[in-house]
Each structure stands twice: as structure tokens, then as C-alpha cells.
Amino acid sequence: AVRSSATAEDLASASFAGQQDTYLNIIGYESVVRHVKLCWISLFTDRAITYRIQNNFYPTSGVYLCVVVQKMVRSVSVGIMVTADVMTGMRHVSVI
């Protein structure tokens, strides 16, 4: 998997999660390099820039992006953990 992670993804006032691209099951060196570049480029799509403007971020400042390359594995089960209770906003509670 070639995944993006941006600094402004989980803010109290905006959630940038999903604004940049993720690619799954990428095979081969050239393909990985191409998809890393596509992840970087996704920071500058119309969708991503418009979302930043709507949330009072200057389109190119204050948001940084890294690209992570992960090995895909077969899973038996999946889950998610958030580091705040989404119902109450309590940040000292983790919810699985």
C-alpha cells in the first residue's frame, strides 16, 4: 500500500482524512515510485485545495504530507481505534 498522511488530518475544527490519495496492492519498484508521486500530487488536487480554503487554510501553507509504503498482508479481522470518544469529545478515552 502507498498511503498519504498529512499533518492537518485530525483537527478539532476540520478532518482532512481522506483528502489525499491511498493506493492498495501496488507491485513493483517502478509502480511504487509512481504511486508515491501520485500521493504527493494529491495534496494539490482541486478537492484538497478547496477543502483547505473552506476550512480557512491557505492552500499551500500549514499542511505537510508524508507518504508511507506498507506491505499488504492478509487479515483475519480488522478494526479501528480512535484516541477520543467521538460521542463526548473526551480526549483521554480511546475507543476501539
Image: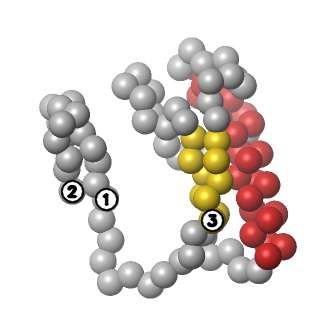
Q: Nearer the viewer, mark 1 or mark 3?
A: 3
Which residue matches tag 3?
69
| Residue 21 visible in the displayed image | no
Q: Is residue 84 left or right of residue 1?
A: left
Per the image, label 2 sits on a secondary structure element best described as: loop
Name the quadrant containing residue 19: top right
The mark found on residue 8 in the picture is none
| Residue 14 visible in the displayed image | yes
- Residue at 24 percent across and 39 percent down: it is 84
Mark pair 3, 2: CA separation: 25 Å
Q: Nearer the viewer, mark 3 or mark 2?
A: 3
Give 91 or 13, whichever is nearer the viewer: 91
Per the image, label 3 sits on a secondary structure element best described as: strand
Mark pair 1, 3: CA separation: 19 Å
Amino acid type, callout 2: Ile
Name the quadrant containing residue 43: top right
- Residue at 75 percent across and 62 percent down: it is 35
- Residue at 74 percent across and 58 percent down: it is 36
Amino acid type, callout 3: Val
Q: Position of residue 22 (x, y in %)?
A: 61, 58
Q: Is residue 22 left or right of residue 13?
A: right
Report the quarter where the N terminus lies.
bottom right
Q: Position of residue 15 (x, y in %)?
A: 45, 34
Do the CB atoms of the residues marked 1 and 3 lie less than 8 Å apart? Answer: no
Mark pair 2, 1: CA separation: 6 Å
Do the CB atoms of the residues marked 2 and 1 lie less than 8 Å apart? Answer: yes
Pick whichever of labels 1 and 3 is earlier in the sequence. Answer: 3
Which residue matches tag 2?
96
Residue neighbourhood size for the residue with mark 2, other residues' Cα within 10 Å, grouped as few (<14), some (14–19), many (≥20): few
Which residue matches tag 1?
80
Pick whichever of labels 3 and 2 is earlier in the sequence. Answer: 3
Amino acid type, callout 1: Ile
